[in-house]
Amino acid sequence: MAGGEAPELRDVLIVGAGFGGIHALARLRDGLGLDALLLDAGAGPGGTWYWNRYPGARCDVESLQYSFSFSDALQQEFDWTERFAAQPEILRYAEFVVDRLDLARSMRFDTRVASAVWDEDAACWTLTASDGRAWRARWVIMATGPLFATHLPDFPGLKDFAGEVYHTGAWPHEPVSFAGKRVAVLGTGSSGVQVSAALAGEAEQLYVLQRTPAHIVPAGNRPLGAAERAEVRARHGELRAQWNAQPGAVMYASLPPAEPVLPANPVSALAVTPEERKAVFERAWAYGGYALHRAFTDLLTDERSSMLATEFLRGKVAEIVKDPATAEALAPRTLYGTKRLILATGFYEMFNQPNVALVDLYRHPLKRFTKAGFETENGHYAVDAVVFATGFDALTGSLTRIDIRGRGGRSLKDEWARGPHTYLGMMTAGFPNLFMVGGPQSCSALANVITANEQQVEWFAECIAEMERRGVTTMEPGEAAQAEWGRLIDELAGPSMVAKGDNWYLGANIPGKARAILLFVGGFPAYKAHCDAEAARGYRSFALA
Ligand code: NA7
């Protein structure tokens, strides 16, 4: 601790100033009247939208839905300008919320929490920052986000590369110019697809390094008008209820009647003629966004139907990309729905530009980086800058990178070495009074994360209120309930495409990470029902002492 001072004592410490942490602070400080303090590694709020400020960064949930519902004032006062908001606007929204709710006075920035240690005798946590400052509190909310811990593979020769190196998930705050430069973007997940499309218009030469072709659909982004905003404001209670009844707590698109919602089709993709199927897929494609998920009922549960969606997307790539070899390499080959669908604007189209080239790492694997660029089995490419869009140690990484020690010094990282154990994705046995927002085994990253976060924050706020009413000091889930939750997580994922690919939902994107189902695949309404049932049972699955 700095200067030998005693750690500041608070009621509750919140880690992370993303949307989960912002809401937790508002709810616990202003709703429950607790002495709450929020700590964040960045210099301002926004969480993932603070760090992922790469060109082209944009949310794949519609702005009118990807926003808080807990405060009417917030819903009424912020003017979203696009159907899918870009990062600067989302960051502005986070700052607006912090300002509007007067939260900054309870936030400490430039504070990277390095450890969290439970003190058995005092029944409280000590959080220590990387610079030695420390705080103590009875409750800790880890609002560290599902997509925070960036992943940079250990590429041979990277330290020899003399050019500029960036990671989409930790983008510099100063503007970066790629004009007149030869740039490589490595990775074609959402981040790689977005940043490449943005750089294609700026870089002199853009190489897109792809290992696995992704499933990509047009976002269908467009400006939002005042009339649309006004309608959603006027009807937001009713619309929120409709959206929250969907598995992903989200609906495409949000604005009836201007743009009627494409109804989920209750028919199997296998039950129609090829012509009918193509017509339905085309309609969903034209609609944009996640409408394709709703084109048929079994795209995410039946491998044959899933492959039909892949086939449809292969055809679309061939229609758009003029060079047949490039089109073939870009066309997805794997099951639809095994990885997160990517919403793009202009990605396939940019390969028709003379300054954009695909480097197919599947056919010609990357050998090494060199001083001047990189080398594949197909030759050497000279570049001035490399942008890594190689993703995140998702869901668990932001927690296991902090040295979290529970009862008897138990290490969370060690306990989760073979996969996370939680109850409701919110608490874990042996780590009392530590709540997670957007953590593993919840439905956060498979749903509209803001809505999922809100539901969790409301749940544990009520939980803390109940502890106060009962006069108990600690709360943690029982091992049996936790084991049962783990079985449910596996069971739900069984038939789903999520369990059938090498994706970050399973930890399969990180070499050496245990493969485990990291999310509740049963949908937001079912997840919420489990949480509500636990509260209604009086938190029987928890030890309250
Ligand atoms: P993703 O979706 O995990 O994408 C990472 C990309 O990086 C993906 O194309 C990977 O190819 C590629 N990658 C990772 N490691 C390597 C190596 N070693 N060699 C070659 N290529 C590699 O991360 P994003 O940041 O794009 O998106 C994460 C989420 O953020 C997204 O789903 C949205 O929810 C927002 P691979 O497919 O593994 O062959």
Image: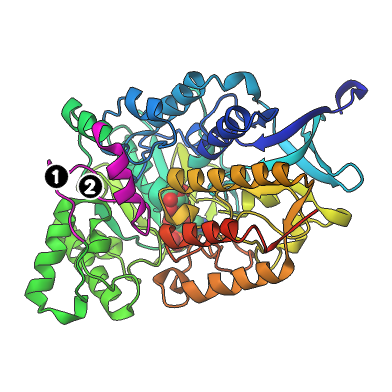
Q: Residue at x 66, y 46 (%)?
A: 466
Tell me: residue 60, above or below residue 49: below
Point out residue 311 in the picture as x, y percentages from the top left corner. Answer: 22, 71
Q: Position of residue 545 (x, y in %)?
A: 81, 53
Tell me what residue is drawn at x 59 percent, y 75 percent: 487
CA neighbours of label 1 inside 10 A, class few (<14), some (14 to 19), many (20+): few
Q: Is residue 168 above or below residue 496?
A: above
User: Amino acid under label 2?
Assistant: Ala
Circle 1 — which element?
Answer: loop
- Comes first in the chain, label 2 or label 1: 2
Task: Name the mark on residue 404.
Answer: none
Label total for image: 2
Judging depth in this view, the residue of 506 and 433 nearest the camera is 433
Q: Secondary structure at mark 2?
A: loop
Q: Residue type at mark 1?
A: Glu
- Where the N terminus falls, by quadrant? top right
Q: CA distance from mark 2 to mark 1?
A: 7 Å
| 288 in relation to 484, above or below | above
Over which residues does the magenta segment extend? Answer: 234-263
Main secondary structure found in the magenta portion: loop
Does the stretch in magenta take in 140? Answer: no
Circle 2 is placed at which residue position?
253
* Residue that carries the numbered disc 1 in the rendered image: 259
Mark 2 touches mark 1? (CB < 8 Å): yes
Q: Nearer the viewer, residue 496 or 418?
A: 496
Q: Is residue 314 left or right of residue 467?
A: left
- Along the line of sight, which residue is nearer the eye, 111 or 94? 94
